[in-house]
Amino acid sequence: MTVDIGLLVVVAVLVSCGVYLLMERSIVKMLLGMILGGNGINLLLVLAGGGAGDAPIIGSDGRIYDTDADPLAQAMILTAIVISMGLAAFVLGLAYRAFTATSTDDDVEDDPEDTKVGLRSEDESPHRDRTADPATGRITRAGDQFGPANASEEP
């Protein structure tokens, strides 16, 4: 089996660009990234399916020839194309619904609650408990701010 390095480079570029676009905050760019990545994966399946061959049609004699192409890769690619088109239509529908509901551009904004969590100090962290002293690992009085009133007392 021979491998076409040029097509592998094209697969790598398509998947890389797709992943880069998926990390953007615009829904349209995310959709384009998903389509690019999907096409790159489909091209990889074509490469994995092997070289060209005769049509895999079995005639009345029932003989299978060694020169027949593998139909499995083609069937998988057709299924992947149908699934990716359905997913693209669904994302476009979501983007249109978000646009009509908010009348803004398609950028995904930060969640205000996530911003509040990101700005919290270490003292306000819910992970802080009676053993919050990282240096000694001992129970401290200032450790448990979220438990019962007497929870921070020494046992």
Image: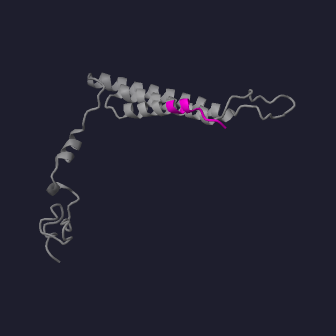
Q: Nearer the viewer, residue 116 or 72?
A: 72
Q: Which residues are magenta?
A: 1-9
Report which quarter residue 81 is drawn in.
Answer: top right
Q: Residue furthest bottom?
A: 155
Q: Name the residue rendered at 36%, 23% in the picture.
A: 96
Q: Name the residue rendered at 74%, 30% in the picture.
A: 56
Report which quarter residue 70 is drawn in.
Answer: top right
- Residue 131 lies in the magenta-colored region: no
Q: Tell me residue 49's x, y (percent).
A: 64, 35
Q: Is residue 42 visible?
A: no
Q: Tell me residue 112's x, y (percent).
A: 21, 39
Q: Tell me residue 99's x, y (percent).
A: 31, 23
Q: Is residue 21 left or right of residue 130?
A: right
Q: Residue furthest right?
A: 61
Color theme of the render:
one colour
Q: Is residue 120 left or right of residue 11?
A: left
Q: Tell me residue 27's x, y (percent).
A: 35, 28
- Residue 8 lies in the magenta-colored region: yes
Q: Is residue 22 above or below residue 146?
A: above
Q: Nearer the viewer, residue 68 or 32?
A: 68
Q: Name the residue rendered at 16%, 69% in the picture.
A: 151
Report which quarter residue 67 is drawn in.
Answer: top right
Q: How many marks?
A: 0
> From the image, which quarter does the C terminus lie in?
bottom left
Q: Is residue 98 visible?
A: yes
Q: Name the residue rendered at 13%, 66% in the picture.
A: 149
> From the image, which quarter does the N terminus lie in?
top right
